[in-house]
Image (cartoon, coloured by chain):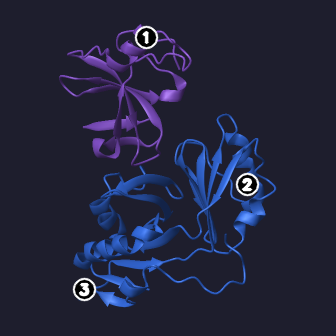
Amino acid sequence: MLITCPYCGPRDVIEFTYQGDGNRERPQPASQDLDAWNAYVYDRLNPAGDHNEIWQHSGGCRAHLRVVRNTITHEILSTAFARGGHKSADNRAEGRS
Amino acid sequence: MAEPHLPERQSPLEPEYHPGSHGNFEHGVDVILSETRPGSILQLAAWPGEEKRLIEVIRKVTGLALPDGAGGGVNSGARAVFGFAPGKFTVVDEAEGLAQAFAGSITPAIGTLTDLSHGRTAIRIAGPKAEWVMAKFFAIDFALPAFPLGAGRSTNHHDIFAQIQRSGADQFDIYVFRSFARSFWKALCHASEEVGYEVQ
């Protein structure tokens, strides 16, 4: 599996570290909304198809990336710096940066 | 810190550094391995949006003008600079004291300077089979159009992080952690045996 890092170009997946589901919406640290925290910790879309993910190019430039990966085919549909926002697979995470 | 006039640093490669020809060199030596031992190895990082100001500081202090683009770099022989991550650059000088030269120029508003002169070991591989040997180590494209002269790359070899700069058409400078350098050097020597190598 190759992931195209926006800085380094196409690299083998062994250089990358999976950092989790990219759809999560972290509540404000001071939030006491238990439903929001519960959703952040446990709720996952678990789609059979395109999935928003956060990866880190830990064996290269060490940038955090937003990656859309198809969970059935492992095709990488898009990559972008996490800092700059990205096009989401299901619109759920759009508008965040 | 790299203070001038200190006793010469010991090389971490020393117990495994054997000048001369080795391996399958009956038909000639196809790569030359050496430790370049630069006096200064710095890591410079710009805060987001401050990259251009940092590049300007690098130009003023070193005289090296970084080209645009990810991984761009330039190598003048005595000095070298290349981008290895967004907004981050490795700057190398044969002479000690480069950190002091940068000291007043990189203000807290622009970014940070980390002196890695004691933390990295610089290994040079040169010769007609340099690309071939490097390709056995790292899963990146070493062909000249994909990896131009002066450009830098961040990658790793069996979890040993490496920064690589192309310092010649058939020459690469590899910066590895000092603590892993001897292990990396031994592996590089083994990988070079098939083409015949000389340690200088």
Task: Name which residue type carries label 1.
Answer: Leu
Q: Describe residue B117's horizontal placement relative to residue B189 as left or right.
A: right
Classify residue B1 by image quadrant: bottom right
Q: Which chain is purple?
A: A
Question: What residue is disc 2 on?
Answer: B59
Question: What residue is disc 1 on?
Answer: A34
Q: Would residue B195 be visible to someone looking at this image? A: yes
Question: What residue is disc 3 on?
Answer: B27
Q: Residue furthest left?
A: A72
Is B149 or B3 nearer to us in this picture?
B3
Q: Describe residue B36's horizontal placement relative to residue B127 as left or right.
A: right
Structural distance between the alpha carbons of marks 2 and 1: 53 Å
Is A74 or B25 nearer to us in this picture?
A74
Structural distance between the alpha carbons of marks 3 and 1: 73 Å
CB under 8 Å between discs 2 and 1 = no
Structural distance between the alpha carbons of marks 2 and 3: 44 Å
Of all chains, the one bearing label 1 is A
**Rendered view: B190 above or below B163:** below
- x, y percent for residue B135: 30, 60
Are marks 2 and 3 in one subunit? yes
Of all chains, the one bearing label 2 is B
Q: Describe residue B143's horizontal placement relative to residue B8 as left or right.
A: left
Q: Residue at x 29, y 87 (%)?
A: B22
- x, y percent for residue A12: 30, 44
